[in-house]
Image (spheres, rainbow, N blue to C red):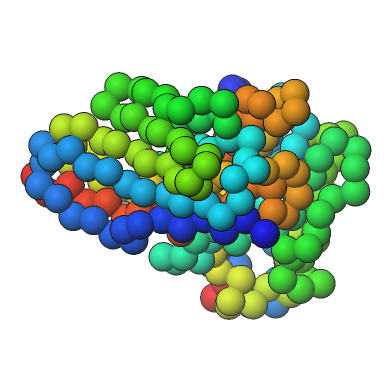
Amino acid sequence: GAGVSQSPSNKVTEKGKDVELRCDPISGHTALYWYRQSLGQGLEFLIYFQGNSAPDKSGLPSDRFSAERTGGSVSTLTIQRTQQEDSAVYLCASIVIGVKGVNTEAFFGQGTRLTVV
Amino acid sequence: KQEVTQIPAALSVPEGENLVLNCSFTDSAIYNLQWFRQDPGKGLTSLLLIQSSQREQTSGRLNASLDKSSGRSTLYIAASQPGDSATYLCAGYSGGGADGLTFGKGTHLIIQP
């Protein structure tokens, strides 16, 4: 497809279970962001991938959170031992990086709504 | 560190009015500024992208301006419609990493029929 695809769109899980969220970015886009958005709040940066460089993990809230990007394309965000405070919408952004930053543009998926009960 | 502020946080106006949403940023060294729309429970939809060398961009009833020297951008919506009701976010791109794409908290817009 032409857009950013995230799956699942909704996930309800029991406290303590592990969950895996998937992001299929736009083909050819070298950079990818994961954000978290709690109800009524702004976007909280989680992690950034750029090409083959080491990811910027500075936004991950705890060691229960991890993410990887395989082959510079699909990314998965894993949350282990989920807690109720992990309930939020998780958004993925696919970034086309222009030369010297010009024409750099972000495209978002529809998000995964995670509910921990 | 880049900080992006959006004013007002919320706005409710009657249908048909022209309105302006404001976005200010602290670091003028941005490559571009992007405006998004977010409907409840949904992802972000890109509305307009303004390069740092540009002053404005237009798409239909939307016009976005950028003044890097003053650290400000505005989104002008003409002849507002109920379907314009959403949260509008601006984001400045300054390069990669955690601070590369910095978002404001958004303006929650309601257009009254």
Q: Residue at x 42, y 25 (%)?
A: B57
- Residue B83 appears in the figure: yes
Residue B111 vertical position relative to residue B34 in the rendered view, above or below: below
Count of marks, rendered view: 0
Q: Which quadrant holds residue B30?
A: top right
Q: Decide which of B14, B85 is in the foreground and name it.
A: B14
Q: Residue at x 71, y 25 (%)?
A: A98
Q: Decide which of B19, A117 is in the foreground and name it.
A: B19
Tell whether B14 sits left or right of B60: left
Tell whether B46 sits left or right of B80: right
Residue B107 vertical position relative to residue B45 in the rendered view, above or below: below
| Outermost front residue | B69
- Residue A93 appears in the figure: no
Q: Position of residue A45 (x, y in %)?
A: 65, 58
Q: Decide which of A32, A63 is in the foreground and name it.
A: A32
**Quarter of the image where the N terminus of chain B is located:** bottom right
Q: Position of residue B72 (x, y in %)?
A: 45, 45
Residue B111 vertical position relative to residue B61 in the rendered view, above or below: below
Q: Residue at x 23, y 56 (%)?
A: B11
Q: Residue at x 60, y 61 (%)?
A: A44
Residue B4 vertical position relative to residue B57 in the rendered view, above or below: below
Q: Position of residue B95 (x, y in %)?
A: 72, 42
Q: Position of residue A19 (x, y in %)?
A: 70, 61
**Quarter of the image where the C terminus of chain B is located:** top left
